[in-house]
Structures are given as C-alpha cells and as structure tokens.
Image (tube, rainbow, N blue to C red):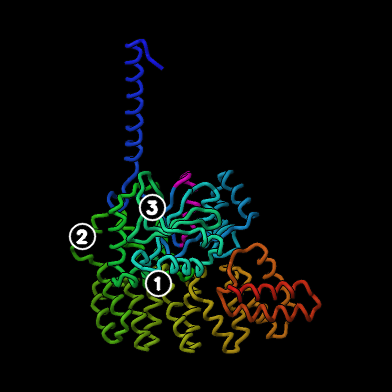
Amino acid sequence: MICRDTSLCFLKKLLSLALTIAGILYMVMESNAYSRLARDSLKDVTIVENHSEVLASWVRKGIRKADLIHIDMHDDMRLVPDDKMEQLKHLYQRKDYISLTRANSLSDRGLYDIGNFVYVAARLGIINNVYWIIPFRFSSLSDAKENLKRFLKRNRFSDGDIQSFSFKDGCFCGRRNDIPVSICNIDTLPSFKKPVLVSVDIDFLPYAATEYRLTKLESARMLLKALSSKAYRVIDASVAYSVNGGFTDIQSRWLGDVVVQMFREPHFIFSKREYGLWSAYQKADTCTSQNRNKDAKGCLTPLLKRYKNNSVLLTYSAIAFYQLNDIEKAFQYAEKACLSNRAYCYTLPHIGRYLTVEDRLAEAERFFLRGWSLNPEMLYYQWTLCFAFTNAGEHYKALSCFEALVPLIMSSSLHFLIGHLYLELEDEVSATEHFNLAQQLLDSESNDLEDWPESRDAITQASLLYEKRGQVESAKKMKEILRRISRE
C-alpha cells in the first residue's frame, strides 16, 4: 500500500521506531532485573537438604515456563501416577503451599519425591525444558551416543524415550516422559538469552572430581567457573545438600557451603589466595581419602587445634580413627560432630555402615543407634544395619530396624522385606499383611524394586505364601513382578 500523505507516513514510521526502541529497552530492563550467576552477588540462594524441597519454593515464587539447568547425578524426572498429579494440580491451583510442602517425601509415601519433582514441575507448567548437566565427559568420545544410551538405560529411561535422543549443539537431546530434556556436561553447557532456573545438587561434585581428576574443592571451582563463563541470568538459584538419603557422603557436605558462598560472593571463584577453612577441609579430605592412617591423624590434629569443635573436621577425624581401627575414638569424634552440628549426625551411621561390611555388627549397632537417637528424622544407610541383622539371623532386631524405616522410606520393597522376616518368624498373618501393603503400593508408586536386590527373595516368598493360601491372582502378580525385574 502506497502512503500518499508524507507527514502521516513520517508519523507512522516514527511511531514504529519508538515502539521498537521501547521493546528493546523493555527487554534490556527485564534482563537487567536478574543477577548473572557466578558473576553478580546472589543474595537470595535457595538452600535445601532434600532436592525435592525446591519445588515448593518455585511454586511460592510464582515461577512459570522457565528453562531449568539441573546440575545433578540424577534426572529426578520419574513418572508420577495420574491420580497423584491431579491432587498436586489441585493444591497448586489453590496455592496451598503448606499442603504442597507436606506432600513431599523421600519415597512414594507422599505425592512427589526426590526422584520425580522435576517431572511434577514440568507438568505444573513451572518449567518448559530441562537441561540435565551430568558430571561425566562424553563430548570427546567416539562412541558417545552409545555410551549415553547405556547411561539412560541405567537411569531407567524407557526404550521409547531413549530412541528419541540425538546430538544437538554438544548435548544429547530427547524426551523423558514427554518432557524435553537435553543432557549436557560442564564442557557443553548450553547458552541462553533469557533468564533461567539453576539448581545444583551437591552429589554432582564428588563424581565430577573423580571424572576430571581434581580435588573436591577444585571440582566446585571448575563448575562455578564454567557457569560464570555463561553469565546466566537467573530467576532462582538453589543448592541441595542431599546427604539425607545417602546421595552425598557426609564428608562431602561442606561442598554445599562452598557453592552457596561462591554464589553469594563470586570473587571467591577466581581468588588465588588460600581459602582458609575450605583449604583445611580439602586437606582433611585428601588425608582420609588416601587412607594414610597415621598420616591422616597427624594431618588432622593441627587443624582441629586451629578450628576447635568444627563439625566437618570432627567428621574427618572420626573417619581417620576408624581407619586406624581405634573404634572408641572414632565413636567419640563422630558423636562430637553430631552434637556440634545436627547436620553432621550422619557421621555416626557413615562409620557404622563400614563396620557392617566388616561383620562387626555389635560395634556398628552402637554407631547407628546413637545417630538415630540424636537425629530420628535422619536417613543415611540405616538399611545396611537391617540387612546385617538379617544376614546374621537376628530376625527380631532386623524386623525392628526395618519397621523403624517405614515412616522415612515407605515403599513396596520395604514391606516385602518385612513380610519375609515375619515368615522367618512363622507369623504368616503379619507376613500377609505386609505383602498386601506392598501390593497396594505397587499400584501407585514409581519406586524400582531392584533398589534392594534382597527384595526379590522376599517377592518369591510372597508368591509361595499366596499360592499356599489359595490367592491365585496375588501369586500371579508376584511372578509377573519377578519376571519384569529380571528383564530390567
């Protein structure tokens, strides 16, 4: 269309130019409203113990349709049954933050858990795309595609989802449970123009340290330097310690403090000076991880004199004394670490776990029970004590131990194991009750039974009991479960 009025044409062009400039200014202003990760100081870092706790935080902050940079050993995108998702959508629409927070758990006893909260966030419209950053190098491997497919298989991706993946811009891109996901690593971090969500699980760093042959502290710096190079503008940055549940070992917990501090004060990332307390922690880690026994004790003594009653160093000291086979001193230091900081009560079962491996059950029991008494909500390898009692034929102790886990990690596997123990004690009524509970959970949960291989024997026994009692359909279901997990 030809504009015949010159002045009108000029005004139209001027208005169009003004709108364009206004749009650009708006985009710039909106972009500048967000801090740059690992470059600007982040005052508001979301800090959680269990990674799934970030979901309630995202809901409270009203985050919508964001891309998530998920730095974690696990994808946390397991499928959530439709009935649970409907309940979650209802809570979300009502903005019932309290109920939504309470619906979180370490297992399927809630509406969502640490293994599926990212899936929930996607289904609720909080996130659009997931960029899962894993701690392994793959970009330089000639058979990267096949290696990554095997990695996805180990992480319970379905065959159909695995087939959807292909390489794009250095990342392995596809879908899981109908959610777009790109698998990247530190060397292939994606670039973004728009603000993003960033969430770091500390269980990532020990694996990255091993993969890149770095100390744990160096692995944290490497990650933060890589993030800084991207200058991501962040809607929200979160850090999950993940010691509860046993995903991060207790002696790596301090790395969470490092990442949080580097988010808040990014000048630490590039500082060449000594890190003080962090350097002390790394020195202690190096001493104990190399199992130098007497050297480790000599290494830690001056550190403890300098930093008295420091829970991290007390933990490393407890580990050093365990390595020296001074179990009494190990217990004393582990207990001190717990009393100094409740978050370090995990030190007691940490050492107890290794004692069970050595068949030192009486000594292990002391560590586990003391830790459990000081922090009853703690979940950190207590099941190893339960299995040790089972293997030792101490069925009543094993039963008491497993039943104490039910409020923490209710799952079908756990009820199968408890039912099996009742069978060993010739209590078929109680055994059937727990086998029935396991069946009910199987209809709604997303847990994988093979998390505890011992549960397979329990399922076999459940099948035999159902056959004996004439419950044909239940016996048939048990056999189908056994066939399924054998295929997997």
Name the residue carrying label 1: 250
**Residue type highlighted by circle 1:** Ile
Please name whichever residue, 289 or 254, is drawn nearer the observer in this view of the structure: 289
State the SS at label 2.
loop
Residue sticking out furthest to the left: 273
Q: For the residues marked 1 and 2, what is the alpha-carbon distance in whole angstroms?
A: 26 Å
Q: Tell me which label, 3 or 1, sits earlier in the chain.
A: 3
Q: Is residue 412 left or right of residue 196?
A: right
Q: Is residue 47 visible to the viewer in this orientation of the structure?
A: no
65 falls in the magenta region: yes
Q: Is residue 145 left or right of residue 157?
A: left
Q: Is residue 182 above or below residue 346?
A: above
Q: Name the residue located 46 percent from the left edge and 68 percent from the top edge.
A: 151
Q: For the residues marked 3 and 1, what is the alpha-carbon distance in whole angstroms?
A: 23 Å
User: Residue 457: which numbered mark, if any?
Assistant: none
Q: Name the residue located 34 percent from the left edge and 71 percent from the top edge.
A: 211
Name the residue carrying label 3: 237
**Residue type highlighted by circle 3:** Ala
User: From the image, which quarter does the C terminus lie in?
Assistant: bottom right
Q: Tell me which label, 1 or 2, sits earlier in the chain.
A: 1
User: Nearer the observer, disc 3 or disc 1?
Assistant: 3
Which residues lie in the magenta part? 50-66
Name the residue carrying label 2: 271
Please name whichever residue, 49 or 171, is drawn nearer the observer in this view of the structure: 171
Q: How packed is label 1: few (under 14 Cα within 10 Å), some, or many (20 or more)?
A: many
- Count numbered badges in the picture: 3
Q: How packed is label 2: few (under 14 Cα within 10 Å), some, or many (20 or more)?
A: few
State the SS at label 1.
helix
**Residue type highlighted by circle 2:** Ser
The quarter of the displayed image where residue 108 is located: bottom right
